[in-house]
């Protein structure tokens, strides 16, 4: 196994994300539930592909790398689209069509960049950023209104994920014994646990909560 710290933490993320998706899938139906499940499942798929690349197929000249690495980036872009679908649930039905078009135009732009050959993880981080910031703002507004601790945890998780992505791009790690990618994965695990707390609370609230404009 190459890069054992990166590979193992990748698959820890897979297990965590799938566990969160399974818990939500067992809940009663809710307008936000499927979008949240899609977030966690696509992140798990992206981490699976990334773990295989880092662990066993690190050579860009090989076919497995050429298949798995673009898939890893594509799944994170898909997770960003799913996260955007969560934010749309805060909007009124009349607003969603216009916002939905913007989401798909942005997703198509990121996909086109990837297909044109730019497959750096920077693209995945950039794709995840807009929906994350919008969701953090929406969670702040709802948390202020409801005084709900779980929603504040979600704000911390979403912003923590953004910070983790920035640190990964800066190749930061607090210790040479831990690679910067492995450190990023550990931060993401904490961030996802906090986000899940908010997701579970949102999926337990009545669907008719007052809407907040997502842009």
Image (spheres, grey):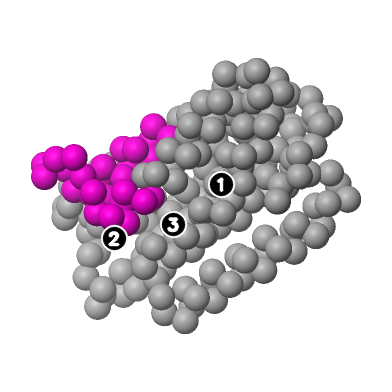
Residue drawn at x 47%, y 60% as measured from the top left: 126
Which quadrant holds residue 15?
top left
Q: Residues within 10 Å of mark 1 (few under 14, many from 20)?
A: some
Q: Nearer the viewer, residue 68 or 188?
A: 188
Q: Residue at x 44, y 46 (%)?
A: 162
Q: Main secondary structure of the magenta part?
A: helix
In the image, taking residue 41 as reference, residue 2 lies left or right, namely left
Mark nearest the camera among 1 and 2 is 1
Residue nearer the viewer, 43 or 163: 163
Of the image marks 1 and 2, the number of the one nearer the N terminus? 2
Where does the image place residue 66, in percent across and percent down from the top left?
34, 73
Determine whether, in the image, residue 59 is placed left or right of residue 30. left
Label 3 sits on residue: 125
Which numbered disc, 1 or 3, marks the residue closer to the eye?
Answer: 1
Q: Does the magenta portion include 28?
A: no
Q: Residues within 10 Å of mark 3 (few under 14, many from 20)?
A: many
Q: Residue at label 1? A: 133
Q: Rounded to the nearest whole Å, what is the CA distance between mark 1 and mark 2?
A: 29 Å
Q: Is residue 27 above or below residue 18?
A: above
**Residue 181 lies in magenta, yes or no?**
yes
Q: Which residues are magenta?
A: 165-192
- x and y, in percent, of residue 97 in the image: 82, 57
């Amino acid at each position: 196994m190459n890069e054992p710290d990166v590979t193992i933490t990748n698959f820890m993320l897979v297990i965590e994300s799938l566990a969160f998706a399974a818990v939500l899938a067992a809940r009663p139906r809710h307008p936000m539930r499927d979008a949240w499940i899609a977030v966690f499942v696509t992140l798990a798929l992206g981490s699976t592909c990334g773990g295989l690349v880092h662990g066993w197929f690190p050579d860009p000249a090989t076919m497995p790398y050429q298949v798995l690495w673009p898939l890893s980036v594509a799944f994170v872009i898909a997770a960003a689209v799913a996260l955007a679908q969560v934010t749309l649930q805060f909007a009124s039905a009349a607003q969603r069509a216009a916002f939905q078009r913007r989401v798909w135009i942005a997703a198509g732009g990121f996909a086109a960049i990837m297909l044109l050959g730019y497959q750096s993880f920077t693209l995945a981080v950039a794709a995840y950023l807009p929906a994350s910031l919008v969701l953090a703002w929406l969670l702040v507004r709802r948390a202020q209104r409801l005084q709900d601790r779980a929603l504040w945890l979600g704000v911390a998780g979403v912003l923590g994920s953004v910070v983790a992505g920035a640190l990964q791009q800066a190749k930061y790690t607090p210790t040479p014994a831990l690679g910067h990618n492995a450190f990023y994965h550990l931060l993401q695990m904490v961030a996802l646990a906090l986000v899940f707390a908010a997701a579970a609370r949102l999926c337990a609230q009545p669907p008719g909560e007052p809407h907040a404009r997502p842009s």
